[in-house]
Image: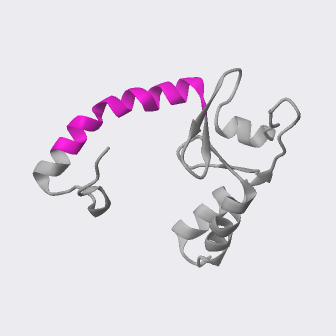
Amino acid sequence: MVVTADPSGCLLLYPFPEWEPIERKLTALSSFNPVSRQLQRILVGSASDVEIDSAGRILLPPMLRKHAKLEKEAMLVGQGNKFEIWSEAAWQAQYEAAGQLPELLGSALQNGELPDELKGFSL
């Protein structure tokens, strides 16, 4: 598995086969573009290989634990092909902010600002 820092303040945990194409795409970006370069620094530069031990645990590097402000409790949030690792406090803030989503979606619908990929999306 590969764990890396996410700009939003969490960590991203990928199975190695899922991480490889992402790393290739990131390293192929122009290093002359400041946004691309910053993403390369954060995502590729902080990526670390981790192994799951016999108890199902992983040892996170200190730099990444500091980035995500991980102390005692952590939240592991499934995201399809990866997991997000959040401090308990940061995850709670994300979860509470999600309560505003119906208002944001309603406003976006009224203003015609809904992203194309969400048009026609249904749960």
Q: Relative to 20, is 115 on the left or the right?
A: left
Q: How is the image coloured?
A: one colour
**Residue 65 lies in the magenta-colored region:** no
Query: What range is drawn magenta here?
Result: 86-106
- Residue 87 position, x and y percent, is 61, 29
**What residue do we see at 59% from left, 52% from top?**
81
Against 103, residue 36 (above or below) is: below
Residue 97 is a magenta residue? yes
Q: Is residue 36 left or right of residue 94?
A: right
Report x, y in % for residue 115.
Answer: 27, 59
Seen in the picture, residue 25 relative to 57 is either above or below; the reply is below
Looking at the rendered image, the quarter that the C terminus falls into is top left
Residue drawn at the location 61% of the way across and 49% of the way down: 82
Residue sitting farthest toward the front:
123
Q: Residue at x 84, y 45 (%)?
A: 51
Give the image location of residue 102, x and y in percent. 24, 36
